[in-house]
Amino acid sequence: MKIHIPTPLRQYAGKQPTVDVRATTVRDALAQLTAEHPDLKRHLYTDDGKLRAFVNVYLNDEDIRYLDGRENAPVKESDNLSIIPSIAGGKRN
Amino acid sequence: MATVQTLPDTATLNKEEILRYSRHLIMPEVGMEGQQKLKAAKVLCIGTGGLGSPLALYLAAAGVGTIGLVDFDVVDFTNLQRQIIHTTADVGRPKLDSAIEKLEAINPFINIRRFDTLLNSSNALEIFRDFDIIVDGTDNFPTRYLVNDACVLSGKPNVYGSIFRFEGQASVFGTKEGPCYRCLYPEPPPPGLVPSCAEGGVLGILPGLVGVIQATEAIKLILGKGEPLIGRLLLVDALGMKFRELKLRKNPECPVCGTHPTVTELIDYQQFCGIRGEETPVVASSAIPEIQPEELKRQLDAKEDVFVLDVREPHEYQICNLGGYLIPLGDLPKRVNELDSSREIVAHCRSGVRSAKAVDFLRQAGFKKVRNLAGGILAWADKVDPSMPKY
């Protein structure tokens, strides 16, 4: 399956826009992503291993917070996982 | 939703207005009724920058009868690459003076209300009161959360747009039936973890794309036509030219629009976002030994042994440089062995923030003779070499 990496985080993922992983659950997919790109980990997870509140993860067009099983929700090869961080946009203030 | 129910007599169009809006009037989705709704509508634009420029221009051209503008900034040269409401001749002028001049030139039949102020917790609800729809064209997290909460508390839709480099987001938050910004992002990122546009840059046309999407949504809300972006987050990727859409849900536990809200009045958003000032170094500057640009110039001219370390990115080096040795800050830990700790090292970046971090890192790594160029290459351009380009 494909994991879409947003622009602000690409610098921690070898500058790639997408990363391919083989996974059975959302948790598994993210674990493989951070194993492959360890610098991403602190941007996605808190020190106690929870997904950060300002990082949203979508399985196709659905927020994983609203999926049955949340991070344990099953995934298929044809699925797309997207990381959607908050961006403020514009200039410095 | 903030559609206008009964139209006042002042919404009647005169002969000149009928001619001006004829391409609207002949389409059934707008027509005379829709154009009068536009004339009666009051839309507040927060910011007249990258997003606010195209947004305000199109709202004015479309005949939105009252447009409020909130901004306190002054036009500078770096704005002109994307803030198309301002021209080269406007550099140095207040953005509101410049913007209002353009909007009045486009459409003399509209009312413009100006708010020369920084939107904050003590003035937001008062400013919002006279408007039907709020359009968020701001650039920072504290104002995003402030606009969101003020919209929810005053029951007004928040037409949201945000940009970074070549990616954008748009949605409509704060309607009774739909989610708000906090349903999507309950908390802001800690300062420093997400780069700002000043650090990351932005493709100049991107705010054009996203600002026009916001204008479209504002006009649809006024007309009560089409399907607004309520409960949907539109993602725009200008490089791939891909538009994707994600489902947003109203979070029943949302602290501001949920069933048991804990935020019932505006709070201190600077504190909420943990802002210490974006350009403030994480390490106290007093702990970082510095060298002034004039002193570095003297040492270099005297051929003293000084090793200039540039910790910016390679594309910045191409804009201007001091001939220093380039190791981007992020690569420093793994390339530290390229440096000779017995030599005098002066680290610099653009403004002195990243190089302060580099100096702090090197000192912790045992380097004793390392100093930070105060004010970075910008200060060098100001104090030593006026021919040096600034960015």
Image: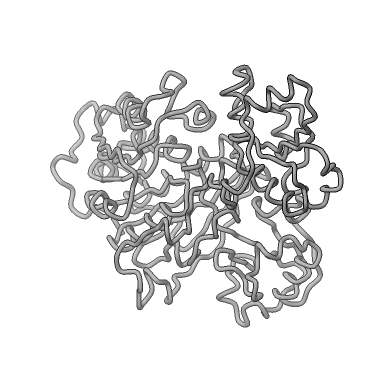
Of the 4 image quadrants, the one containing the C terminus of chain B is top right
Number of callouts in the render? 0
Q: Is residue B26 above or below residue B42?
A: above
Q: Nearer the viewer, residue B321 or B20?
A: B321
Residue B229, x across and y down, in percent:
46, 56
- Name the residue: 58% across, 65% down: A56
- Name the residue: 35% across, 78% down: B260
Q: Is residue B116 left or right of residue B230?
A: left
Residue B371, x across and y down, in percent:
68, 40
- Name the residue: 75% across, 75% down: A28
Q: Nearer the viewer, residue B275 or B98?
A: B275
Q: Is residue B34 above or below residue B150?
A: above
Q: Is residue B133 above or below residue B54?
A: below
Of the 4 image quadrants, the one containing the N terminus of chain B is bottom left
Q: Nearer the viewer, residue B245 or B20?
A: B245
Residue B81, x across and y down, in percent:
54, 29
Q: Residue furthest left?
A: B9
Q: Quadrant of residue B383?
A: top right
- Name the residue: 74% across, 49% down: B362
Residue A81, x across and y down, in percent:
68, 65
